[in-house]
Amino acid sequence: MNFLNKFKKIKKPLIIAEIGNNHEGNFENALKLIDAAKKSGVDAVKFQTFKTDLFYSNQDLNRVERLKKFELSFDQFSKLAKYAKKKKLLFISTPLDLKSLDHLKKIVDIIKIASGDNNFKDLIKSSVKSNKELIISTGLTSLKEIEDLKKFIQNLNHISKTYFLHCVANYPVDPKNANLNFILKLKKIFKDNIGYSDHTIGIDACLISFLLGSIVIEKHFTLDKSFSKFRDHAISADPKDMSLLVKKIKMYGELTNDKKKSYLNCENKERTLFRRSYYFNKSLAKNRIIKSNDIIPLRPGNGIQLNKKYLIINKRTIKNVKKGSIVKLSDLKK
């Protein structure tokens, strides 16, 4: 099923709560994060799936030790996927090694490729073979590398099912480095298959990204920004922030709706009240030929419209009319 295409058609962004590793290896915390994400109103949850030994060199023992603590088993990810789907949330995860990808292919709705792996062609190629929709963050890339990535995906005949997210791989991103207008460049390259993965503090960047055309918006998510010293909590949205983001996106979508084929139905009353129609500028006797200075355009506009003045000029009155009365076609000889 093309989940992202559905969101694109209704012009609503897919809002992803990026749980990542904020569960810190605790399965119960992961379930609580899914519950909180659901209550916040997001459309999807996203995790990171990895086997540390296949992901990170043991040269950095401190990092490897922490990563091992954060690992969840494949069986636990399968349970999380079922739980998310039971909650009617899309389940997304980022494979950080090929073995993890092999398992995720069976359980996820969408595969996400991290900025650090957007040049890991074997991982991308194997993800494409799953025939699932693919989201790729474009952090760490130059414009040329993005163009090369596009060609690579096109050659795999997967470009229509791949979405490219503007991302700055820095934690946290200073507002002056957010570079949000780059989303417009991505739009020129990938049309509507674009989005934004946020690492700034707060929700403003996500809201701006929506106005720039993002169809996917990903924001880190935590139960508590001070949950631990793990870096990702501090840059994440908590449930209050995420709920506000969802509400604001909905409101921004309503504010920017393009319905203008004619005037809007909600303007019906004001259209009559604020428009003008023609009134007699003086009292006229029966059988008088009406000239321009005999009429005046005044509010409200519940009579002959201003663009139909030709229906009045040089016509004769069929009865005496009083100054200030509205001009009616029934008062005029054809």
Image (cartoon, rainbow, N blue to C red):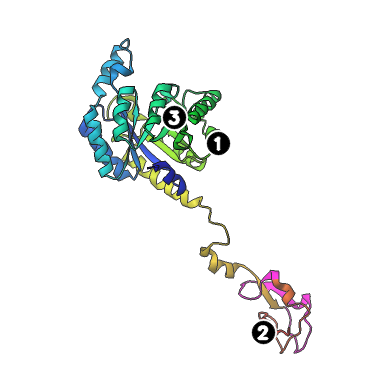
Q: Nearer the viewer, mark 2 or mark 3?
A: 3
Labelled pair 3, 1 in contact (Cβ < 8 Å): no
Left or right: 286 as drawn, with respect to 237: right
**Which callout, 1 or 2, points at the residue further toward the start of the chain?**
1
Point out residue 304 in the picture as x, y percentages from the top left corner: 66, 75
Magenta span: helix, strand or loop, mainly? Answer: loop
Q: Which residue carries the number 3 mark? A: 137
The amino acid type, in three-letter code, at marker 3 is: Ser
Residues 93 and 156: in front is 156
Distance (Cα) linking label 3 and label 1: 15 Å
Left or right: 248 as drawn, with respect to 298: left
At x 24%, y 33%, the residue is: 78
Judge whether residue 296 is colored magenta.
yes
Point out residue 202 in the picture as x, y percentages from the top left corner: 41, 36
Q: Is residue 225 visible?
A: no
296 to 63, vertically: above or below: below
The amino acid type, in three-letter code, at marker 1 is: Leu
Point out residue 224 in the picture as x, y percentages from the top left corner: 29, 34
Mark 3 element type: strand
Q: Is residue 40 visible?
A: yes
Magenta stretch bounds: 281-307
Q: Which residue carries the number 1 mark? A: 184
Q: Which residue carries the number 2 mark? A: 330
Point out residue 293 in the picture as x, y percentages from the top left corner: 78, 75
The image quadrant that residue 34 belongs to is top left
At x 68%, y 81%, the residue is: 329
**Which callout, 3 or 1, points at the residue further toward the start of the chain?**
3
Judge whether residue 290 is colored magenta.
yes
Mark 2 element type: helix
